[in-house]
Amino acid sequence: MRRALPEALLAAMLTAVLAVPIFGLRIHVDGIDVSLDRTPTPVVVAVVIVFLLRLFQGPLRAAWARARPPAAWRNPLADVLRRTRQQPRYRTLLWMLLLIAAVIWPFTASRGAVDVVTLALIYVMLGLGLNIVVGFAGLLVLGYAAFYAVGAYTYALLAQHYGLSFWLSLPVAGVLAALTGFLLGLPVLRLRGDYLAIVTLGFGEITRLLLNNLNVLTGGPDGIGNIPRPTLFGLEFGRRASEGNATFHEFFGIDYSGEHAVIFLYLLGLALVVLILFVINRLQRMPLGRAWEALREDEIACRSLGLNPTVIKLSALTLSAAFAGLAGAFFAARQGYINPESFTFIESAMVLAIVVLGGMGSQLGVMLAAIAITALPELAREFNEYRMLAFGLVMVLMMIWRPQGLVPATRPRLELPERAEPTP
Amino acid sequence: MNRAPDQAPTAEPAASPLLEVRDLSMRFGGLLAVDNVNFDVRRDQIFAIIGPNGAGKTTVFNCVGGFYRPTSGSVTLDGQPIHRLSSHRIARLGLVRTFQNVRLFKTMTVVENLLVSQHTQLETRLLPGLFKTPKYRRAETEALERAAFWLDKVGLLQVANREAGNLAYGQQRRLEIARCMITHPKLLMLDEPAAGLNPQETRDLDLLINNLRAEHGVAVLLIEHDMSLVMGISDDILVMEYGRPIATGTPDEIRGDPRVIKAYLGEE
């Protein structure tokens, strides 16, 4: 207790210093008058909380240790996960149930909720894609938004200039983004660790600046608008069809509802996520996926066995970029309007945070983190100003308590069958 | 076995050596780590490099394997100069190595380690794997069978599905050798394979190396400090000190060489 008092005082002082600029001052704009309001209450509350917590740290810890729930129901989710991992049959069953729930859900939920989750699905795609380079191959890429932008602008431009439909543009967007990844990777993947991160960071910024300043092609900061929504085999989801087309509600003889379009977009996003999940799951079990893992573990050993590290890294970056391209095209179709502001560094950082929070290399973790990071702020809009603060706090806490992420990655392991006949 | 065409045994006269190292030097700034080393490794030969710590043995390995680019000199494998190739190209030509501090893929299972090392022989294209074509499935099954064969050979079949990092040290060493052998090398380079092994394991290693040469026709180049092992299995020995070769010859010649005795025991 005697030692705790000065420590607590020091901690309280530090809190005061940190909290004053964040909570204690508020810019007040009244017409052209800008003044600084002092709001001392939150600062005092924060200081008192920190002071008390530090002061009674010892007793609190002891109480916490005593009050700990038994291991079995402390983390029921982890328990279920462990069991499903051991039983592949339950695992498929669990995924199937999740998928069925995800398909049925939009018909019961509100329009707004479906819209928010559709946005979350875009981040799921991005997270899963970035997970390939960061989680599997162990390469830190900080300019992921660039590939996302390539996908989005590909669809927007193709639709604007050539009237290409979403379905035709989608593969083109994926291929072009993949090509961008390939061309970037060719010179850059010889670099290691930090250098790669810096170069990709630069690439992301260059792409954004190009989009901003290449007025002739991209419309500059104004972006591109009137991007057509995706159609269902040519059926549009508007109230009235454009020339020569039919609408969804007329074709099926039901009343028009704005919800149809929202639900359709959601299901489309879900289908893309399932496609990406399928591809990644196969890849993990393929020689290529194994080579990514091996390369992350030990590049020198890989080289000594004849694996070409550049080719393997390049394949990871190319595939990852392709998925970002698909997500980008879908994003453009959902928004109907894009501009360079959607592809800033914050976007790249956000996707990276999703991968790190979810657990590098873990599909389920990345999906949960993507939904948490995109959907939660939408649900609690009144706390919007503290969003970045909460975000930082979550990151720090995660690094302390769960550096391996929400759902730590487990790799599908290739097992040698019991009765494998040793043949030369 | 589906050997790549460039791995097929060539019908060259047996007299030409498998590996020729000529005037090899490696300089790190002011330090001449390897100074003018020459040696030949013949087919089916077990060749050892010995010398006190810091003599430059591992540097020779790194130059031969393409991990360093030698400052001067040439290295020829099967008549083809390799000293300018990158290490993975050299490995594909049939020269693979183990490492002084075992370098396994620790979080992967034992059998996965052997699958990764077969990468260059497998169906690695994207689409066949995504759609699991019959050819792809067959290649994967064969790879597993080959892995089982080599695990049986080095006595690790029981632990095939364990994580490689959790194996006992001696088992890790044997796995590393199996991982090399599954690529059908012409020349196997072992960097201190007996380091950290107990006497029984060292005797097993002796048998294993001899067996690899007899049954799989691989030449072996090894660095080793365990003199009983080196003297027992080597056909020829190169002794190095301070980066310079000081003697070459059969084990008997080396044992009696005054320069070697001086290098190891110091001057009287």
Image (spheres, helix red, strand yellow):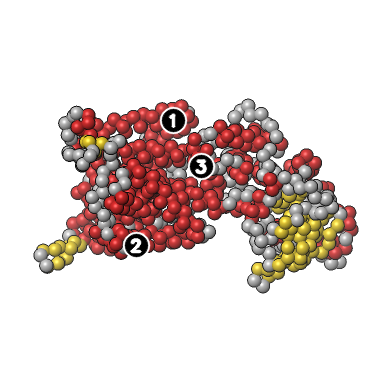
Q: Is residue B35 left or right of residue A38?
A: right
Which residue is denoted by mark 1 in the rendering?
Answer: A91
Q: Secondary structure at mark 2?
A: helix
Taking the view exactly as shown, the residue that stands out farthest to the bottom is: B30
Viewer-proximal residue among A179 and B23:
A179
Which residue is denoted by mark 2 in the rendering?
Answer: A210
Q: Secondary structure at mark 1?
A: helix
Counting from the top left corner in percent of width and height, residue B102 is at: 64, 49
Q: Amino acid at mark 2?
A: Leu
Which residue is denoted by mark 3 in the rendering?
Answer: B126
Give the residue at x 49% y 59%.
Answer: A188
> Label 3: few (<14), some or many (≥20) within 10 Å?
some
Query: Is circle 1 on the same chain as circle 3?
Result: no
Counting from the top left corner in percent of width and height, residue A180 is at: 43, 55
Viewer-proximal residue among A316 and A156:
A156
The C terminus of chain A lies in which quarter of the figure? Answer: top right
Give the residue at x 45% y 39%.
Answer: A279
